């Protein structure tokens, strides 16, 4: 019976067959150390996996933060465009009120200008409605994607 075969088998029955007390105690300690080593190895592997998961989550968090910052910038640009459009609409409405007060019944030039301004105002209002509709759609899609991302994250954890 060789030392390596005892170590490989790690069999308590085999150790109990050894009659010499010190040798038996040595083999028991050796077996205990092998078991501890195996547990430590498993624990270090689990720790490594946990560390890898944490790093992956940190990277994912970074990407999400960057995407959120880009979304904020996009929304700010959309808000600026919307405010500009609202200002133009208000300006046109004001000009039309002024033209209505100035307007003479016989003045074809003023009436033509009023008609042009009314058409432009309608175009701007339609553009504003389209922009709001697109913004609502994009916001809904973003929420849906965020919900899916949160579900995936919970699944990973």
Image (cartoon, rainbow, N blue to C red):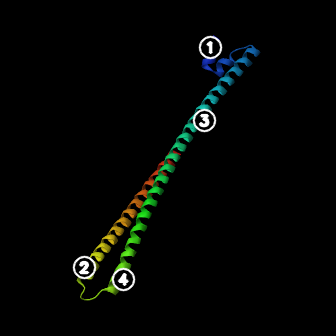
Above or below: residue 13 compared with residue 57: above
Instruction: Give me the C-alpha separation between circle 3 and circle 4.
Output: 75 Å
SS for dot 3: helix
Considering only order in the chain, which callout, 2 or 1, is on the residue closer to the N terminus?
Answer: 1
Identify the image quadrant of the N terminus.
Answer: top right
Q: Which residue is mark 1?
A: 4
Give the quarter of the image for residue 126: bottom left
Instruction: Give me the C-alpha separation between circle 2 and circle 4.
Output: 15 Å
Considering only order in the chain, which callout, 4 or 1, is on the residue closer to the N terminus?
Answer: 1
Q: Which residue is mark 4?
A: 98
* Front one among 137 and 37: 137
Residue at x 23%, y 88% (from the top left corner): 106
Q: Which residue is mark 2?
A: 112
> Which callout, 1 or 2, points to the residue nearer the camera?
2
| Crowding at mark 4 (Cα within 10 Å: few <14, some 14-19, many 20+) | few
Q: In the displayed orientation, state which residue is furthest to the top.
A: 1
Considering only order in the chain, which callout, 3 or 1, is on the residue closer to the N terminus?
Answer: 1
Q: Residue 92 location, x and y as percent?
A: 36, 75
Give the quarter of the image for residue 90: bottom left
Give the label on residue 113, or none. none
Residue at x 36%, y 68% (from the top left corner): 128
Q: Is residue 95 left or right of residue 148?
A: left
| Crowding at mark 2 (Cα within 10 Å: few <14, some 14-19, many 20+) | few
Give the label on residue 47, or none. 3
> Which callout, 3 or 2, points to the residue nearer the camera?
2
Q: Residue 46 location, x and y as percent?
A: 58, 35
SS for dot 1: helix
Above or below: residue 139 compared with residue 65: below
The answer to whether the residues at label 1 and label 4 have Cβ atoms under 8 Å apart is no
SS for dot 2: helix
């Amino acid at each position: 019976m060789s030392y390596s075969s005892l170590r490989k088998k790690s069999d308590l029955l085999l150790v109990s067959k050894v009659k010499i007390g010190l040798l038996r105690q040595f083999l028991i300690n050796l077996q205990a150390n092998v078991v501890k080593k195996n547990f430590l190895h498993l624990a270090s592997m689990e720790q490594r996996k946990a560390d890898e998961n944490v790093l992956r989550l940190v990277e994912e968090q970074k990407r999400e933060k960057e995407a959120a910052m880009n979304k904020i910038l996009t929304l700010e640009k959309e808000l600026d465009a919307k405010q500009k459009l609202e200002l133009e609409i208000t300006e046109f409405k004001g000009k039309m009120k002024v033209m209505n007060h100035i307007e003479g019944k016989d003045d074809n030039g003023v009436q033509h200008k009023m008609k042009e301004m009314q058409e432009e105002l309608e175009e701007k209002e339609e553009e504003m409605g389209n922009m709001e509709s697109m913004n609502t759609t994009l916001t809904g899609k973003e929420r849906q994607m965020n919900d899916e991302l949160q579900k995936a994250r919970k699944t990973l954890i």
